[in-house]
Amino acid sequence: MITTDICIVGAGPVGLFAVFEAGLLKMRCHLIDALPQVGGQLSEIYPHKPIYDIPGYPIVTAQQLIDNQMEQIKPFAPTFTLGERVEQLAKQADGSYIVSTSEGTDVHCQVIAIAGGLGCFEPRKPDLQDIETYERKGIDYMVKNPDSYRNKKLVIAGGGDSALDWTIFLSDIAQRVTLVHRSDSFRGVPDSADKVYELAQQGKIDLLLSHNLLGVHGNGVLTHVKLSNKNKEEFSIEADNLIPLYGLTPKLGPIAEWGLHIDKNAIEVDTFDYSTNVERIYAIGDINTYPGKLKLILCGYHEATLMVQSAFKYVYPEQKLSFKYTTVNGIHAF
């Protein structure tokens, strides 16, 4: 049995920052994540993706951010259970909880902080015949190693931020990048859309708006992608790789059975402290919802900060919380 103060479900950037804020208040944390490494979606889906809205960093890659956060929380010696999914929750007579995982790990804690991002997630796949045949044989749903596309003919499908960002990033790596989008406008950040239009005007990428994916073909591995234009004319282009970036389908998994108030696969919280309707259970980051919610890492950091302030009363019920600035108090290990 692992004993800790706060059990954090999810080891992404928001969960890791909660460790830092909890450590400042002398609270121990144990993190559980179904993924085999820390970093959540940042490390699993787009470790090399540039992030621009972290204060103090004009640009930082997703993995660099996670690496920096791991260094930041090192003084507080958090413990981890990775590659295991949270399955069961048992409330104890004193109000504490025992959290059990899919592999039989038990964690006894005073407070639970759900920081699971989108929860258990699966990529949204295009409805194409035989698409499973070419998965990992030319079709990828996330970019894990950009260099693997070096000098390849690459087709990216989608119109959101991920499709735009990866089109820009991979235009300097792949032999040719073709961005296919079913609409004539993008859903992503306007600045990124402008950069994609500029690359297309310069002839550095092929941009096919108002086009749809129709099929994939090959001989054991992907060789061609079939498309149609707005006039319903069909044609094929050569492709070593196809990356459909249509977003993720979130699933809460067993957490959905914990009696929490849930709205469209997100956990409802009180913005006073990001507590749920179940005592001693909080939800922070992309997995929660409230009026005005923005799914930004920066907002998750704010939520984590207020959450640990509230959790303190369960961990140290006899003590009065005294807020202190790190510039005055410093950072001290346990």
Image (cartoon, rainbow, N blue to C red):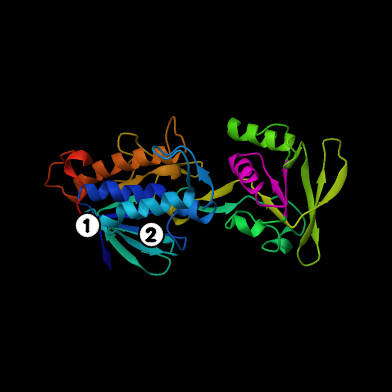
Q: Is residue 65 left or right of residue 208?
A: left
Residue 257: % across, % down: 43, 53
Q: Nearer the viewer, residue 266 or 38?
A: 38
Label 1 Cα crowd, 10 Å radius (few <14 / some 14-19 / many 20+)? few
For residue 187, which quarter of the picture?
Answer: top right
Q: Is residue 81 left or right of residue 119?
A: left
Q: Is residue 280 visible?
A: no
Q: Nearer the viewer, residue 115 or 190?
A: 190
Task: Say which residue label 2 marks.
Answer: 32
Residue 313: % across, % down: 19, 45
Up-down: is 98 above or below 27? below
119 part of magenta stretch? no
Indicate the quadrant containing the C terminus: top left, top right, bottom left or bottom right: bottom left
Q: Nearer the viewer, residue 45 or 31?
A: 45
Indicate the quadrant containing the N terminus: top left, top right, bottom left or bottom right: bottom left
Instruction: In the displayed orientation, state which residue is furthest to the right.
Output: 233
167 part of magenta stretch? yes
Q: Is residue 306 left or right of residue 317?
A: right
Q: Is residue 71 left or right of residue 313?
A: right
Q: What span is in magenta?
A: 153-180
Amino acid type, residue under disc 1 in the picture: Ala
Amino acid type, residue under disc 2 in the picture: Ile
Task: Say which residue label 1 marks.
Answer: 93
Residue at point 54%, 47% (across, down):
49
Residue 324: % across, % down: 18, 39
**Circle 2: element type:** strand
**Circle 1: element type:** loop
